[in-house]
Image: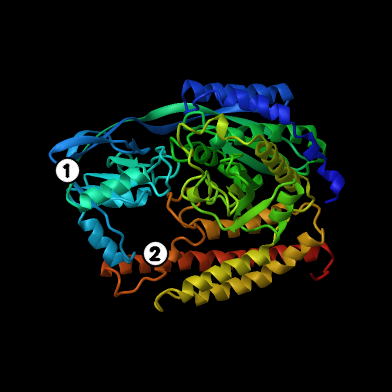
Amino acid sequence: MEQKEFSWLGDVSRSRLKQDMAHISQWYRYTGSWGGEACVDYILGQLREFGIPCWAESFEFLRSYPIITRLQVEENGVFRPVQALAAVFSASCQDLQGPLWCDEATNGTDLEESRQFSAMRGKIVLTHRRHGEDILKAFHHGALAVISVWDTPEEKLHHNTIGTVWGGPAPENLWRFGSVPAVCVTKREGEKLWQDAAAGRVTRARLTVQMAQKVVTARMPVADIPGQRDSFLLVNGHYDSWYEGVTDNAAANVSQLECARVLWKNRHLLQRGVRLVWWGGHSDGRYAGSAAYADRHYEELRQKCVGQLNQDMFSGLNCQLVGKATGGMEQAGLLKNWIQEAGAACGPILDGLNRSSDESFSGIGLPFSMMSTFTPRPDSEWMPHWPESAGPWWHTVDDDITRLDEEHLVRDAKVMVHMAASLATRRDLPVDMPGFIQKMDRVLAQIDGQSDPCFTLCDVRARLQKLQKAIEPLQTLIDTGALTNSDPLVQTFAGALMRLSYSWGSEYEHDDAYPGPSLFSQLRKAVGLTRENSRPVYFLAVQNRFQRQKNRLLVEIEELCRRAYEWQARWEKEQGGVSL
């Protein structure tokens, strides 16, 4: 791409960004609330003013947020208050009392973890665990309630979620919503509680939680900028917020509006279309909006969507370096180049996705999946608050306009515009499918090398080598520009590789939310597991899951090989027998 094609960077308007920020940041944008709906109306109004085709898409979801959190601990026979905040999808309770018990760290093995969780029965548990998976385990083992200690030193309470169901309930997982009272306390308060409990000064806790949890209807703005082909890129980010939510996520919202305006102005350059969606139900519904959209538009997304760019947590004072988390299908060094071409200082490029931040499309299999990430400079004052929170104001009432860096806002809008335009205007998508297969093999080799001998992946890795040989001629077709439109090839093969790597369940369902990498997440359960450090039943359970995931990989890789050979044969026939 020649430098003259970067003209869209000059179209980004600082004044428009500031104007949109002044409007959107004035509302508390809880999904389905008056403020949330006002934000939807404003975005749609701006899109219509630009002349961009747009509409609002309604959806129902289970919304949850705390109304009252009251925690007290008994010290010398007297209950004293402790500042706390209930998590999204916590259970409600009234004056729940019980002994306070400290959840000491274990060595992480199944045996040690099982003993630790078994000791929680009948207790109000003080712990450093925050993820819903652990909170539900505590509930399953009889814990009365859970008090999670925040890991970074800020004094403000952060909103948290213990939701493990991605998007919304299904009949078999309804029990996971509102099952156990769960609250957070600050690091300082939590450490003091821990010391007092260890010394015997604090022995009991009393908790009252009132949650607003019900099914509500809300809307999401959608803009559609057509290209010369049927395929399109999905640019997205959530509009719902805690309080004003300036850096999470108003700054991304206004940057996305500006991206829509600039791409509409340059639409004559677009090879493929760009669809922009502002999600609801991100924080107060566990990615409910993006999951609902994926469900409703499943076939269209699978057949026509070439990738998604997710925009989250933009332009804070602490967002000094621009990075990306990526599924890794793009050519090496591409993201760094794009960031630098847009005039930004490049931070870490995270190769691999986590199960978070509206990553609702893994089961569909989109060739590209990229999420915005930012880091402070290593010597920055903000580094102690990283990575457990995106800043001392993240998910707190302090995320207001004073946390915004205007220069970062303009920079981040340019990076978003440049990435979207670069993907939408290229004749051929910048994929590296053989390179991605090599990455798959490296990760499988690591899992193999760190697992008990009964967990072997040699046969899967051998099948991958066969696939790489079958894919290489197709990659050559893309690299040489031999196809009039290579998007269908990329969607077929790169999309399937992404789905195989980053999801594990049914392609028509959403995998649960869980901590850690989503690349071969179920195979990773075998890492470090032995018969000696785990319960026999757990070892058997992991063996079963491991074998079933192997079966899935072996069968689907073989099917991809067959389709690759068919594609190659069809091309050679169309070329009069010319061999690739």
Residue 57 appears left or right of 115: right
Foreground pick, 251 / 416:
251
Q: Amino acid at mark 1?
A: Gly
Q: Could you classify mark 1 by the number of other residues whose Cα lies within 10 Å: few (under 14), some (14-19), or many (20 or more)?
A: some
Q: Which residue is mark 1?
A: 98
> Residue 577's quadrant in the figure?
bottom right
Circle on res. 455: none
Circle on res. 545: 2
Residue at the spot x=81%, y=53% of the render? 484
Of badges 1 and 2, the one in the foreground is 1
> Residue 352's quadrant in the figure?
bottom right
Foreground pick, 172 / 162:
162
Q: Could you classify mark 2 by the number of other residues whose Cα lies within 10 Å: few (under 14), some (14-19), or many (20 or more)?
A: some
Residue 83 appears left or right of 451: left
Percent from the top left, x then y, of residue 210? 29, 30
Q: Is residue 172 visible?
A: no
